[in-house]
């Protein structure tokens, strides 16, 4: 008899635990998030303010402080935030203390195209509008920039971004109607003719060797133009 009573008691305790857990879960889901924390990854200045993100959620009728957790669609929130022209990605999740965290990765511009209107080219090679809150100090692109040659420009920008020397010294790119590229650096008055992007890695190696030799001999200011188009040689024009 005692064994039978213990068995019933065990079942009752199990059902009680399940009931309390379900009740607690329902109450938790019926609550709105305790707080909303918008966090921008990295230390770069903001192209978009947290208040703009909050306003965007309100405009899309997704104002999270008024929506209970059981109907809160995190994926929809991520999609809404990521659709902003200054945002690359967004991650939305609930925290252990009942709050809601929004982690935002801004788009990163590699260069600014000087045109009317001007725009950035981001690290994905996509056009990016200028920001009303911050102007990035990036390399400038001049000349015949079109939708058909922006990929060529992006390849050159990527090469500059991945080369510590060029990333430090390159200031301007110029592209003409034949998609021939030239470049300027911050401590040289001469134009660097790159041409097309064939053998680009070798052209960069050749230029850096020329630069170091000319700097050592104090000749950098003597040149008006440096031509990298020729195979295995650099032609400097004084």
Image (tube, rainbow, N blue to C red):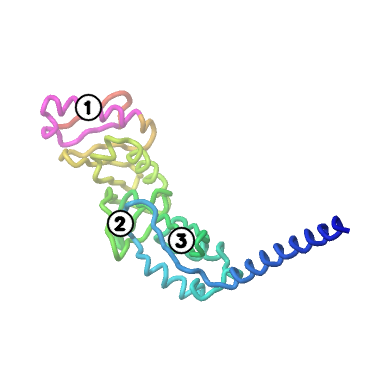
First in residue order: circle 3 vs circle 2 = 2
Specify whether 33 is left or right of 200: right
Specify whether 51 is left or right of 99: left
* Neighbour tally class for label 3: few under 14, some 14-19, many 20 plus, Cα within 10 Å: many
State the residue in front, 19 or 64.
19
Outermost residue on the right side: it is 1
Q: Secondary structure at mark 2?
A: loop
The residue positioned 45% from the left and 68% from the top of the image is: 35
For residue 197: magenta? Answer: no
> Which residue bears the numbered disc 2?
45
Q: Position of residue 85 (x, y in %)?
A: 42, 62
Give the extent of the magenta segment.
202-228
Kindly check if marks 2 and 1 are in contact, taking CB atoms under 8 A apart as contact: no
* Residue 27 drawn above or below residue 18: below
Q: Secondary structure at mark 3?
A: strand
> Which residue bears the numbered disc 1?
210
State the residue in front, 95 or 25.
25
* Residue 75 drawn above or below residue 71: above
Kindly check if marks 3 and 1 are in contact, taking CB atoms under 8 A apart as contact: no
* Residue 153 drawn above or below residue 217: below
> Which residue bears the numbered disc 3?
102
Q: Quadrant of residue 49?
A: bottom left
Which mark is nearer the camera, 3 or 2?
3
First in residue order: circle 2 vs circle 1 = 2
The residue positioned 36% from the left and 41% from the top of the image is: 156
**What separation in Å lies between label 3 and label 1 (alpha carbons)?**
49 Å
* Residue 106 drawn above or below residue 65: above
Which mark is nearer the camera, 3 or 1?
3
Specify whether 116 is left or right of 123: left
Q: The N terminus is located in which quarter?
A: bottom right
Q: Position of residue 81 (x, y in %)?
A: 47, 64
* Neighbour tally class for label 2: few under 14, some 14-19, many 20 plus, Cα within 10 Å: few
């Amino acid at each position: 008899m005692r064994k039978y009573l213990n068995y019933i008691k065990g079942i009752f305790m199990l059902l009680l635990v399940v009931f309390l857990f379900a009740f607690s879960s329902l109450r938790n889901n019926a609550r709105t998030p305790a707080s909303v924390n918008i966090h921008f990854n990295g230390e770069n200045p903001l192209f978009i303010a947290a208040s703009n993100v909050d306003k965007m959620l309100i405009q899309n009728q997704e104002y999270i402080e008024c929506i209970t957790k059981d109907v809160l669609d995190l994926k929809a929130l991520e999609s809404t935030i990521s659709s902003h022209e200054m945002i690359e990605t967004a991650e939305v999740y609930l925290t252990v203390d009942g709050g809601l965290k929004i982690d935002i990765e801004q788009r990163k511009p590699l260069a600014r195209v000087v045109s009317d209107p001007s725009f950035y080219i981001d690290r994905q090679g996509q056009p990016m509008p200028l920001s009303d809150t911050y102007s990035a100090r990036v390399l400038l692109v001049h000349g015949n920039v079109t939708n058909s040659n922006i990929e060529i420009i992006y390849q050159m920008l990527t090469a500059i971004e991945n080369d510590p020397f060029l990333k430090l010294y390159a200031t301007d790119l110029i592209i003409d109607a034949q998609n021939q590229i030239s470049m300027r650096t911050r401590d040289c008055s001469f134009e660097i003719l790159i041409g097309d992007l064939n053998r680009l890695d070798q052209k960069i190696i050749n230029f850096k060797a020329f630069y170091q030799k000319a700097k050592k001999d104090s000749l950098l200011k003597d040149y008006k133009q440096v031509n990298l188009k020729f195979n295995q040689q650099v032609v400097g024009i004084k």
